[in-house]
Image (tube, grey):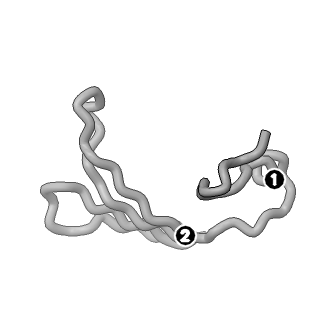
Amino acid sequence: MGHAADGQGRSWVTLLTGKAADWRKSFFAEYFFERPFVGTPTLTAVRTDTAKLIKYAGHEKWTGQATGM
């Protein structure tokens, strides 16, 4: 099965089969409140190979942690 020409991303097959792949080392994520998932907070997050920062709605400061990797 192919992929849509305008689709983003790529196959996870190399990652799941343990083969070397040139994957990104960081990412940005956002999650917004959804009524069916009331317990899941709205958040903004940045993750690198050495740290993560999370900003929760209604909280002034970012929550951070160095991973020691």
Residue 31, labelled with which disc? none
- The residue positioned farthest toward the top in the image shown: 36
Occupied quadrant, residue 29: bottom left
Quarter of the image where the C terminus is located: bottom right
Residue at x 73% of width, y 49% of height:
12
In this rendering, would 30 be left or right of 7?
left
Q: Earlier in the sequence, mark 1 or mark 2?
A: 1
Give the distance between the C-alpha atoms of the residues marked 1 and 2, in whole angstroms. 18 Å
In this rendering, would 15 be left or right of 60?
right
Helix, strand or loop at label 2? It is: loop
Residue at x 20% of width, y 68% of height:
61
On the image, the x and y values in percent for residue 50 come to 54, 72
Circle 1 packing at 10 Å, graded few (<14), some (14-19), many (20+), is few
In this rendering, would 17 be left or right of 44?
right
Residue at x 26% of width, y 49% of height:
42
In this rendering, would 50 be left or right of 45?
right
- The residue positioned farthest toward the front in the image shown: 5
Query: Mark 2 highlights which residue?
Result: 26
Identify which amino acid the numbered label 1 is placed on. Answer: Thr
Q: Is residue 56 above or below residue 68?
A: above
Quarter of the image where the N terminus is located: top right
Occupied quadrant, residue 36: top left
Query: Mark 1 highlights which residue?
Result: 14
**Which of the two residues, 69 or 22, is positioned nearer the viewer here?**
22
On the image, the x and y values in percent for residue 5 come to 67, 55
**Which of the two residues, 21 or 56, is positioned nearer the viewer here?**
21
On the image, the x and y values in percent for residue 26 come to 54, 69
**Which of the two residues, 47 or 27, is positioned nearer the viewer here?**
27
